[in-house]
Structure formats: C-alpha cells, structure tokens
Image: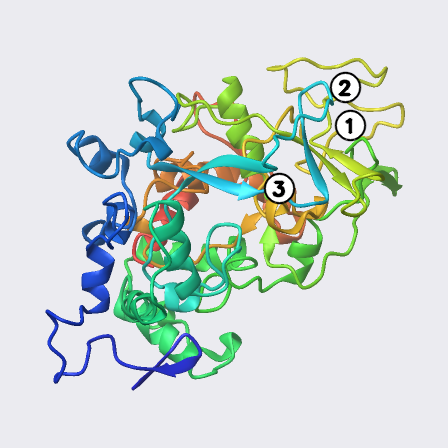
Amino acid sequence: MILLAGCAVDAPDEPAAIDHQVTPSGRDRFEHAFAGTNGRTCASCHILGDHGILRPDRVAALPASDPLFNPIDADDPSATAPTYLHLQHGLVRITLPLPATMDVLDLEGNVITNAARTVEVWRGVPTIENVAITAPYQLDGRIANLRDQAQAAISGHSQGPIVANAALDSIARFERTTFSSPRAEFVALLTAAGVDPDDIPIPEKHMPLSASAKRGRDLFERACAACHGTATTNTIADRTVHDALFFQLRPDGTVIYDSVDGVPTPRLTPHPHDEFLNIGFGLLSGYGQLGILPMANADVALPQYRFRFYRDATRTTQVVDLPPIPRDADGNVVAPPNATTQVDANGAPIVGPSLAPQWFSTDPGRALITGDPLDFDAFDIPQLRGIGHTAPYFHDNSHATLHDVVDSYSRFILPFLPTLGFPLQYQEPNSPFFESLSLAQKADLIAFLDVL
C-alpha cells in the first residue's frame, strides 16, 4: 500500500499473482480503448510521451484516420467534410449544462438559450502529471475525483458506455503515480499523509539552481506565490490578493466604484471558500478574437457569449448581465475593437468584472458550474510543477510559450494587484506596453519556471 491523494490505496501495479493479460493494469486501460467507444483512449488526448497533454504539433502529425479526429470535436460537426482547426490547436469541445439560474444572451441582450440548455466551449487538455495534488479536476473544478473524471472522459470524448468502477479505479491509481519530477512526487506523498501545505518543505529552496533561476525563485515568491503558493504551487496563500478580485456589480454588469481619498476604487464583495479566480485571461482571449491582442489561438473562432444571471431557478428576477456591453458616459455603445476604457461623470471606469471593456466571453469558466456571477470567467489556480513541458497555456491554449505567459502577467495581471508591489515601470524597446517586470526579471522567472 502507498499513501496517495489523501488515502491509502493499492500500488499502481496489479498483484503479481494476477495475469495482466486477463486483468489489465491501469496504464493498459489508460492506453487502450474500451469496447463500445469511438476508438479514443485516455492517451489519445493525454499523450504520455508529451507529459500527458495534447500538443498542437502532435495533432498536426497524426493521420486523418486517427480516432482523435472524430466529428464531436470538428469545427462544425454537421459539415459534410469536417475540419479540425480547433483540435489542431490542442482544443477539444466541452459541452456543459447551463445552470438553472442562467440564460444565454445575444449581444443585444435577447435570451437565446437553446432547448437543451447547454453551452459549448473549447478548452485545452490539462496534464495528468501531478494529479495526486490537484483535486478537484477540470479547469472549472466540476469533477471531484479521478474515477468520475475518467468516466466523464469515456462518456463525453470517447462516446462510450458506463465502465465498471474497478476499471476506473485502476486508471485513477495509474494517474496518481504520474509525476513531472521526484520533487512533485515528494510533495504529493506528504500531502497524502495529511501534512499541512504550509508545512511541506519546498524542494526548490534546497536544490542546485543557476544564478538566474535563483533570482527567478526569489521573484516567484514575491510575484507569484500569493496564488501559486506552498510546495503544491496551487494554493492561494495570500487571501488579500484573492479577496481583491471580487467586485460588487450593478444589474447591468458594471463594477461599482467608490471614491477613496479621491481615487475611484472598485467596491469589493466577499466570496469566501472559493479557490477560482478571474484574473483576466478570459478577457485577453476575447481580445485575441477581436484582433486587439496577438494570441496563439486567434485564428480559430471561439464562442461569443453573454449571460443573464437570476436570483433563483425560476429565472424571473434578474441579478446581472455579464459582460456588460461597453458604453461611454452618455450611455452610447462603444463598438469593438475600440478597447479604450470609458469613465463616468465621477471619473470612475465603466467596466465589468474583468476591469476593462469586454464585449463577450469566450468561456465563462466556473460560473457554468455554480451559476454565480462572481465566478464569471474564473478558472482554477493550476499547479505549476512541470510547466516548462506543458505548452500551450491557459484554459484556451491562448499562450504558446512561457515567454508569452510571463509577458501577459507583467503587462496585464501584476499591475492590477497593487498589494504585490509591482506597478507598471518598464518598457521594452519597440514595445507598446508598459510592464511590471523588467526584461531581466522575466528571463529569471522563466529560468525558474523551466526547472520547477
């Protein structure tokens, strides 16, 4: 027996007395299709030789006959000759039920929820490495355990039947033994043993690092560990940073601002017991669609959603529409791609919860699970171990490299978290952006992330 994922479980290999040709191991089940499926396996998307992700270049190299190219993930499943541009970007279609407290709107504010009350989004494939320390699962945390995650994948992506729990459990046991490094396994074992995350030694504090990576580690502690804290790298360690990202909204979706010492300041609202954050990457995804910012997925069409949130499942009392259609101080609609933030008569920005003009959401994230407008465009805080091997990044594969990730944090994330102390203060030659991190700091941070 070994301790993993908070409980004692059998070791990943079946007992020696069992014939593996009769009772497949967890890895066998992971890599081979179940009867009654479309031929896809867990490994069709979570490719073990690629650190358990679906790399775009790997998809591009597959023959057209590969089971991965199934109409359920075609750009248009009803097309006579399906194309797979989304899949070639490492994106798979996710169909989710719409919460009873939500409706889909068009860009004019009309309810257009489909009869099935479902929503489709396109998401990247998370790595299976280090899943022993990353529950709950999926980018929106909708699945509590690996058994249910495996069955959901078999049902949804492989179009297969309900599988016996013993087979699902063997897959889960295999996945819990898949790590990006011995350091990640060390952290997982202590976590499973019940050690408080704050008490788990951070291995990188004691391992040999280059001078650049050491500087990057120190910078990580100051700039990143507030949300990617402790040895698990997915613990929100600074609740003040968390709490500073939930805003009180008007029914039209705009943030309420108060004057604090003469400075317009967004009015905060409590959202305790929550580990999902909207830090603006849904906004950036939409800007890529509009051609405002270069994004790695900008050449594929992502959904353009607006939502109405209601008080309860009767859907009779509106709470808020998100995102709010950008308007100027006179109430006139500001058409895309004009991304200039408008202000009201008091000088307060006229913005929604992403704190910038946003015409639509390509994926509302956690809100599709909870029906809570405070979860709009929010996703989980991912663990970062092995991140140097799992490009592309974010829920929609919008960032192709770690350089892209760090650039976006430096330009669009850190400046909006003033308690961290990284104001806009640098500008690279020939760049239109002011940044929170210097070119040297970004290089050091990437050097550390590459070895994390």
- Name the one closer to the observer, 430 or 372: 372
Q: Residue at x 14, y 80 (%)?
A: 18
Q: Residue at x 67, y 30 (%)?
A: 356
Number of residues whose C-alpha sits closer than 10 Å to that of mark 1, classed few (under 14), some (14–19) or many (20 or more) = many
Q: Are marks 2 and 1 in contact (CB under 8 Å)?
A: yes
Disc with the residue nearer the chain's start (2 vs 3) = 3
Q: Residue at x 42, y 84 (%)?
A: 193
- Name the one closer to the observer, 147 or 372: 147
Q: Position of residue 404 (x, y in %)?
A: 40, 36
Horizontal side, residue 326 vs residue 410: left or right: right
Q: Which residue is mark 3?
A: 98
Horizontal side, residue 16 vs residue 407: left or right: left
Number of residues whose C-alpha sits closer than 10 Å to that of mark 3, classed few (under 14), some (14–19) or many (20 or more) = many
Which amino acid lies under the numbered mark 1 shown in the image of this protein? Ile
Q: Secondary structure at mark 2?
A: loop
Horizontal side, residue 351 vs residue 91: left or right: right
Q: Which residue is mark 2?
A: 327
Q: Is residue 200 above or below residue 360?
A: below
Query: Is label 1 or label 3 in front?
Result: 3
Which amino acid lies under the numbered mark 3 shown in the image of this protein? Leu
Q: Secondary structure at mark 3?
A: loop
Residue 350: mark: 1
Quarter of the figure with residue 177: bottom left
